[in-house]
Amino acid sequence: MSLKKILVANRGEIAVRIIRAARTLGIETVQVYSKADADMLAVRLADEAIEIGPSQAAKSYLSIDAVLKAARASGADAIHPGYGFLSENAGFAEAVEAAGLVFIGPTAETIRTMGDKAAAKATAGAAGVPVVPGSDGVLSELGTAAALAREIGFPVMIKAAAGGGGRGIRIAQDAAELETLLPQASAEARSAFGDGSLYLERFVGRARHVEVQVLGDGVDAIHLQERECSLQRRRQKVWEEAPAAALPEAVRRDLCASAVRLAKACRYRGAGTLEYLFDEEAAAFYFIEMNTRIQVEHPVTEMITGVDLVQEMIRIAGGESLRFTQSDIVCRGHAIEVRINAEDAARNFAPQPGTVSGLTVPGGFGVRFDTLLYPGYIVPPFYDSLLGKLIVWDESREGALARLRGALAELKIEGIPTTASLHTALARDPDVAAGRIHTRWLEGWIDERHGGQLDRLQERIRGQAEG
Amino acid sequence: MAVHTVFSPLPGTFYRRPSPDQALFKEVGDTVVAGDTVGLIEVMKSFTPVTAEAAGRITAFHAEDEDAVMPGQPLVDIDT
């Protein structure tokens, strides 16, 4: 069965990306849009477009009923969910199939299992994928914690089971500290969350974020090597690379093999990503979670492998088997992606929608710009701030950095502030060039720079007052 | 008596509650002092409080919870 018409249940640059992939395969496209998105690029590029609701995502892009109604009205035979919105909603995947349509992604069961942190960790452990060492669930009694912590290895994190988003976490460097902190943590968790349950986990201080791209057809699975996404601000990736230059070759082999084991164990169908922490000192990696969808940073993998991941997702959903064996995947060179967001780096990254009065897109060999922009486009305030992704490729990482500096110098987005200025500075930073980074490096770098600017400003004011 | 109107400073989505399962910040008839939060505006997943600039009694809301608003759009009338 081959697909004839795909409904794109998303917006922005990924909707454009999906339409282009479908078009290459000779498949028609239907773009759904909210009232605020009538002028978006994907609406202009798709064969058909259907308004499905008001600006609020909950009543448009997140409305399963509205999306399915548009699918039936347009006669689409498949739905691509992109990333975010309904892409990891098992209920949506189920509803799409119940409506007799194809969901371009894994089964609802896979989404459900891998979306549950505990179930995903258990599945990974069973497939022989290393997970962060820790207590098996919550601590039954605090008395056994010291022995367990010695087994896990200090420093350990004491986490409140009911906590989240970084809240309710304490770090114990040794057994004495653990003994002091445990009762405190338990009492605090009880008063803050109404539940004093705690669990222990090895603390990885200076970790890198690495992730492996997998592709499966429900029977077989392969990997398309890894990416590194350690440059993050508030847990949001801003800069991604492939491959991860910091990985020793033997570690890379083990990492990618572990991802394939897990993909095979859950009979993975479509494109997916396994995220890991990489502890550089210990040269150890630990599985964190799986994203059962296409990711924002997928282009860097496409650039080094030459595989169009979105096209492969569509082919697999249409019933084709994997077209590649593992040995067909040969990586070449180095790719970097930087996210261009509608944010004002000088004002603490405050998001700023508005009209793009002018646009100059960089080009040339090894340069790709996946964007939702066109000159005159009004960026609406209702959705996330991603405007586009500038992706470069070269034979080496050094070459890719040079190409990135050139492409950023050419890129001009007029009318609204963007994070292109942040990337221009990062692309010239010696630590970035040397790869001396970890997941908390960027926040420190930003604080230092902005702190530094404030200091200079204060000195100047003081100088003027004294002069 | 004069009516003081609070206008939206930004384009975005107007919320009258701190989160979907919580009570409204203020209702018609409530008294406020300058600086009281009367709503939130979400711009690209970032939230900015909307505050009363004068003390008085709220006589009207011109935007409902979750309405799309534009800069300069009237949101709340306060009888001072």
Image (cartoon, rainbow, N blue to C red):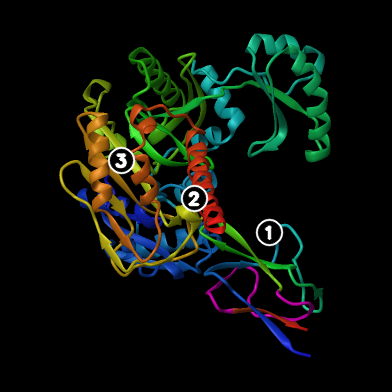
Residue under circle 2? A86
Residue under circle 3? A299
Nearest the viewer among A118 and A451 is A451
Q: Give the quadrant of the N terminus of chain A.
A: top left
Identify the magenta region.
B53-73
Nearest the viewer among A263 and A449 is A449
Q: Position of residue A406 (x, y in %)?
A: 23, 45
User: Callout 2, which amino acid?
Assistant: Leu
Chain designation of label 1: B
User: Callout 1, which amino acid?
Assistant: Pro
What is the CA distance from the residue labelled 3 to the residue labelled 1? 36 Å
Write the residue at 82% across / 27% down.
A184
Q: Residues within 10 Å of mark 2 (few under 14, many from 20)?
A: many
Q: Secondary structure at mark 2?
A: loop
Residue found at the very far left of the displayed protein: A365
Q: Secondary structure at mark 3?
A: helix
Whether residue B64 appears in magenta in the rendering, the answer is yes
Q: Quadrant of residue A329?
A: top left
Label number found at residue B20: 1
Q: Position of residue A80 (x, y in %)?
A: 38, 49
Residue found at the very far bottom of the displayed protein: B1
Q: Nearer the viewer, mark 3 or mark 2?
A: 3
For residue A303, side relative to residue A365 (left or right): right
What is the CA distance from the residue labelled 1 to the residue labelled 2? 19 Å
Write the residue at 57% across / 20% down.
A132
Q: Secondary structure at mark 1?
A: loop
Q: Position of residue A359 (x, y in %)?
A: 27, 62
User: Callout 3, which amino acid?
Assistant: Pro
Q: Quadrant of residue A261?
A: top left
